[in-house]
């Protein structure tokens, strides 16, 4: 895969997170939401779980393809 | 753009709570239902959903054990039914649009620019003759023909352009500002200069022609001052031929001019009684709508005031309003006093004298008296003036005596 230089998010279904500062995050390749509170957003991906922690977290939009999280993001943890 | 599309399609703000709202959201995303602005407050979730997607929510809510309540309806699909109920509003809207579209087929303003010699009134009457007026259909106007007619009717217009800008007809003209050159008549027949008055010559400068009088001579009206036929002599002092020229000279003649001005002994003056009546009107283009009225007074004059809002002028809407003020008056006869008569007659005299001065006439001596004659005020003036004279009169060609002409021919061949 490295030899062919194929993108891993496409081939392996790896999670893709784009962070803009600490206020916005675009997330792709997830399975669904496991938990959603103002302090925590826990997402299920193909291989692991991802937890966005912070304050005043909200979901601007949520589709099958991608989602946008906004608020004050403190940390992103892989569980 | 996305916001606008959402508004057009319509969307709902909903509240979701229950056993597993997260699963509810996951199922929504799996079934390609877009959710946005998802906010959690306590155990309740608030989110937005499009109207069409909302109808697919029932099985999801049942499956996840959540409850869904509509909080707010937004967008056009919710606005339209309310609008349709307001029939008068819809009718007004349709009428306004129809009026707007309909009125755009007409000319509502005519603007003229670049005119200096041609007054607006002259141009208005020209347009009225061509039936070009405010309120006419755009289709009836032939711009090319109008431009041609402007150039034809006003010779001083060197360039013209007419164009329709929206509902406004803009006419631009350019007038000829170069000096008008008067072509001098060709020097074909020749002219004599003759005197127009009786008098004494005080100065002469001859440029062309043969002088027939001298300074100090007394001449009568019709006397030839300068002859246009210039003789060419033979060696024996006989006339060989005449060349005819237009006699040209500055000849100053001192002569007497008289001036008489009469003034009727009485005059009629308007005496306003102070009684007035006002009548209001609205004018739209050529059409005028006014309050009905009978003849207000036996003798009266009217003052018309007309105004329009600046915004209407800018929009090119020819809507004006104003009022007539009818003022009653009486015709009262008065007699001129000596002072009044003198003032009036002197005014007229000074106009006459100014006109003389403008013509370059020098006044040497004047004798003016005001008197009454047959009940009229009469001003008699006698002026000793010096002015340039000389009227061109065509020459009647005289034949040269036959013998002289033959002699000339013989002598010519001899040489």
Image (spheres, helix red, strand yellow):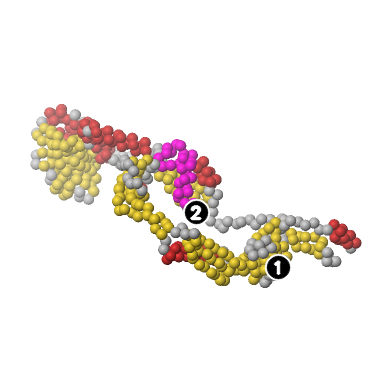
Q: Tell whether B371 sits left or right of A8.
A: right
Do discs 2 and 1 belong to a common subunit?
yes
Report helix, strand or loop for mark 1: loop
Q: Tell whether B1 sits left or right of B376.
A: left
Mark 1 burial class by Cα count in 10 Å: few <14, some 14-19, many 20+: some
Q: Chain of mark 2?
A: B
**Image quarter (top left, top right, bottom left or bottom right) of the C terminus of chain B:** bottom right
Residue marked by disc 1: B213
Q: Chain of mark 1?
A: B
Q: Tell whether B391 sits left or right of B15.
A: right
- Vertical position of residue B378 compared to residue B141: above or below: below
> Which residue is pictured at 20% across the width and 39% down the height?
B36
> Which residue is pictured at 58% across the width and 65% down the height?
B257
Write the start and end of the magenta stretch as one range.
B117-143
Of the numbered discs in the image, which one, if any, rests on residue A57? none
**In the image, residue B140 lies in the stretch drawn in magenta:** yes
Measuring from the top left, give residue B29's x and y in whole percent.
20, 34
Report helix, strand or loop for mark 2: loop
Q: Quadrant of residue A79?
A: top left
Measuring from the top left, give residue B27's x and y in whole percent.
17, 32
Residue marked by disc 2: B117
Measuring from the top left, give residue B9's x and y in whole percent.
25, 34
Q: Tell whether B39 sits left or right of B148.
A: left
**In the image, residue B150 lies in the stretch drawn in magenta:** no
The front one of B248 and B383 is B383
> Which residue is pictured at 19% across the width and 43% down the height?
A69
Mark 2 burial class by Cα count in 10 Å: few <14, some 14-19, many 20+: few
Tag 2 and tag 1, C-beta contact below 8 Å:
no
């Amino acid at each position: 895969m490295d030899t062919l230089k194929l993108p891993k998010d496409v081939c392996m279904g790896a999670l893709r997170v784009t962070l803009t500062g600490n206020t916005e995050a675009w997330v792709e390749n997830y399975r669904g939401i496991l938990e959603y509170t103002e302090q925590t957003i826990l997402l299920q991906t193909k291989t692991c779980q991802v937890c966005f922690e912070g304050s005043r977290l909200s979901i601007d939009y949520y589709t099958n393809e991608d989602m946008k999280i906004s608020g004050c993001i403190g940390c992103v943890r892989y569980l | 753009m996305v916001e606008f599309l959402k508004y057009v399609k319509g969307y709902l703000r909903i509240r979701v709570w229950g056993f597993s709202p997260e699963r509810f959201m996951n199922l929504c995303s799996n079934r390609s239902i877009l959710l946005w602005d998802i906010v959690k407050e306590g155990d309740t979730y608030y989110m937005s959903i499009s109207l069409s997607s909302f109808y697919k929510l029932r099985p999801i809510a049942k499956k996840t054990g959540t409850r869904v309540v509509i909080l707010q309806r937004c967008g056009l699909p919710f606005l339209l039914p309310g609008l349709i109920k307001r029939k008068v509003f819809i009718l007004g809207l349709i009428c306004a649009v129809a009026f707007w579209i309909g009125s755009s087929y007409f000319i509502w303003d005519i603007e003229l620019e670049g005119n200096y010699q041609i007054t607006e009134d002259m141009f208005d009457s020209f347009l009225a003759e061509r039936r070009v007026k405010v309120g006419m259909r755009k289709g009836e106007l032939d711009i090319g023909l109008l431009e041609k007619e402007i150039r034809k009717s006003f010779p001083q217009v060197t360039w013209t352009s007419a164009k329709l800008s929206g509902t406004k007809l803009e006419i631009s003209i350019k007038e000829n500002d170069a000096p008008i050159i008067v072509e001098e008549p060709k020097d074909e027949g020749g002219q004599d200069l003759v005197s127009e008055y009786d008098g004494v010559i005080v100065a002469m400068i001859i440029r062309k022609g043969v002088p027939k009088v001298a300074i100090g001579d007394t001449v009568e009206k019709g006397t030839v001052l300068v002859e246009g036929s210039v003789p060419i002599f033979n060696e024996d002092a006989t006339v060989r031929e005449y060349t005819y020229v237009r006699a040209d000279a500055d000849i100053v003649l001192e002569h007497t001019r008289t001036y008489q001005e009469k003034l009727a002994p009485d005059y009629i003056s308007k005496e306003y009684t102070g009684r007035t009546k006002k009548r209001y009107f609205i004018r739209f283009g050529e059409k005028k709508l006014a309050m009905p009225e009978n003849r207000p007074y036996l003798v009266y004059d009217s003052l018309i005031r007309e105004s329009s809002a600046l915004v209407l002028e800018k929009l090119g809407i020819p809507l004006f309003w104003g009022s007539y003020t009818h003022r009653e008056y009486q015709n009262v006869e008065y007699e001129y006093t000596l002072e009044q008569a003198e003032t009036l007659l002197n005014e007229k005299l000074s106009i006459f004298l100014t006109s003389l001065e403008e013509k370059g006439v020098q006044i040497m001596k004047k004798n003016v008296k005001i008197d009454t004659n047959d009940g009229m005020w009469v001003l008699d003036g006698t002026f000793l003036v010096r002015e340039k004279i000389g009227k061109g009169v065509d020459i009647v060609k005289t034949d040269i005596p036959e013998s002289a002409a033959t002699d000339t021919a013989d002598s010519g061949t001899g040489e």
